[in-house]
Image (spheres, grey):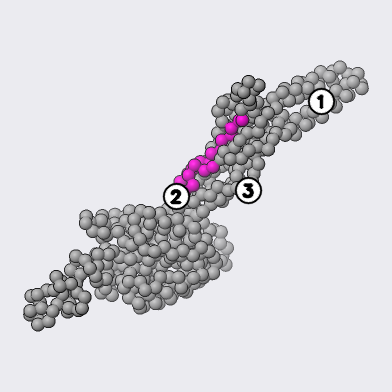
Amino acid sequence: MTDGAGWSATAAHARAVVGSMILAGTAVVLRRPDLLVLAAPLFVALLAGRQAKPTHSPVVRQGLGNRSLTEGEATTYRMQIDEVAEVDGEGQAARPRGAETVAAVLEPQRLIELSPADGQLVALANDRAEPSVLELVVRPTRWGNHSIREPLIIATSSWGSYRWTAPRRGATQHLQALPRAANGSGSPSTPASAPGLVGSHRSPRHGTGVEFANIRPFVAGDRLHRIRWPHSLRTGTLHVASTWADQDRHVVLIVDAVVDVGRSAGVGGAPSSLDITVRAAAALAEHHVGQGDRVSLVTVGSQRRDHLPPATGPRHVRRVLSTLAAIEPAGVLVGPDRIPKNLGRGSLVIILSPLRTPWALARAVAMSSQGLVPVVVDCLPPDLENRPELNPHEAAAWRIERMRRDHEARRAGERGVPVVPWRSPADLERVVRDMHRHRRVRSGWSA
């Protein structure tokens, strides 16, 4: 809430005062009654404007209707201008003399659409019994944390004689635009969760559970009710039935935010590499959480380094989206050692990167040798070298860079790490299935 600082005479009011005084003085000196006739309307306007001078400064209440939404959605910036009622001698509220028109100007910002497009609103003030309300439509066209600066609010009195400007203290309204899942996570291949199961993917580890895995020799600590007596009698040694743990697959999303390649045009426009990365991570998180998997998130190369532990459920998806919206490229590789260590064997690790630095492929190859299942998703825009903002030399440089990246991707594929362009969670799921068939790793992905 901000209180006004007072009304001041407008430039038009000052010019009318000066003009009327000059005409009146000239009429007296030159004895010209006709000049007095010309000055009379100015005197009338001055007296009427003086009589209508507001007696109190308005009170402004302003703010966003919704501070958190998905990119492409819209909210309103609402400005309410209240008049302060006068109190007469008997202590009763009287009708105050206030503004006749109110106007607001909100400075346009890139990747934020306004309606009206220029951010300007003008309206007649309502009856003094009710506040005047101005509403601007604000629509962020790209994910991220945006700051909406205070608009300039001006009120004018009758006859345009006095003007009041709301004080601007530099405060901002914070708007969080969550990323929209790229290509949607509700693909037709997404299976529904089976009743009675935590998720649709079996855990890759042995442990306490109800699903049979194999028969193995008895070791200290095994439960007696797990002993398979027919097999033990045939072999002469105790054997037990082992089971898969009642715990779903752990999916690790590693987001490479070192640099943002390309210029983002917002929702519906040409994406940058970070747009593809963030929206793909959002789609994968929604996809795997919807299947009951445990999802963790690690950001690398962002000014704010985040690590979300594995969890599931709608609240966790919201945390993942909020973390993705806060990503800001640092320009340098920050904290690659923050990638979780000691992950369970068979955990699915998805690295989303434009592959501008070699660490992503090197880390994926190292994880593959540790028994993990790494997949690298290439998030470089496929049409980057054909964009009109690039000159011929820059386009040629990007074509050479793409050849280098393709060579490194083939070398990583030869070592068991697939590098695939981003399309949808269902396409990535098929790639992981093929990996398991090739490596003969028992996993929770259905063949």
Of mark 3 and mark 1, the one earlier in the sequence is: 1
Q: Is residue 66 visible?
A: yes
Taking depth in this image into account, of 35 and 12 the one nearest to the observer is 12
Gap between marks 2 and 1, in whole Å?
58 Å
| Residue 205 position in % (x across, y down) | 27, 71
Taking depth in this image into account, of 382 and 396 the one nearest to the observer is 382
- The total number of labels drawn is 3
The answer to whether residue 77 is magenta is: yes
Query: From what the image shows, is residue 258 above or below residue 265?
Result: below
Which quadrant is the C terminus positioned in?
bottom left
Type of the residue with mark 3: Gly
Q: Secondary structure at mark 3?
A: loop
Relative horizontal placement of residue 443, taking residue 406 as reference (left or right): left
Q: Which residue is mark 2?
A: 70
Question: Which corner quadrant of the image does residue 340 belong to?
Answer: bottom left
Q: Which mark is residue 170?
A: 3
Badge 3: how crowded within 10 Å, few (<14), some, or many (20+)? Answer: few
Q: Identify the residue at horizontal 31%, vertical 63% (top origin).
A: 429
Of mark 3 and mark 2, the one earlier in the sequence is: 2
Q: Identify the residue at horizontal 92%, vertical 22% (top origin).
A: 29
Q: Magenta region: which residues?
A: 63-84
Q: Which of the two marks, 3 or 1, is nearer to us in this view?
A: 3
Relative horizontal placement of residue 243, taking residue 427 as reference (left or right): left
Q: Which mark is residue 20?
A: 1
Q: Which mark is residue 241?
A: none
Q: Secondary structure at mark 1?
A: helix
| Residue 409 position in % (x across, y down) | 41, 73
The answer to whether residue 240 is magenta is: no
Is there CB contact under 8 Å for labels 3 and 2?
no
Type of the residue with mark 1: Ser
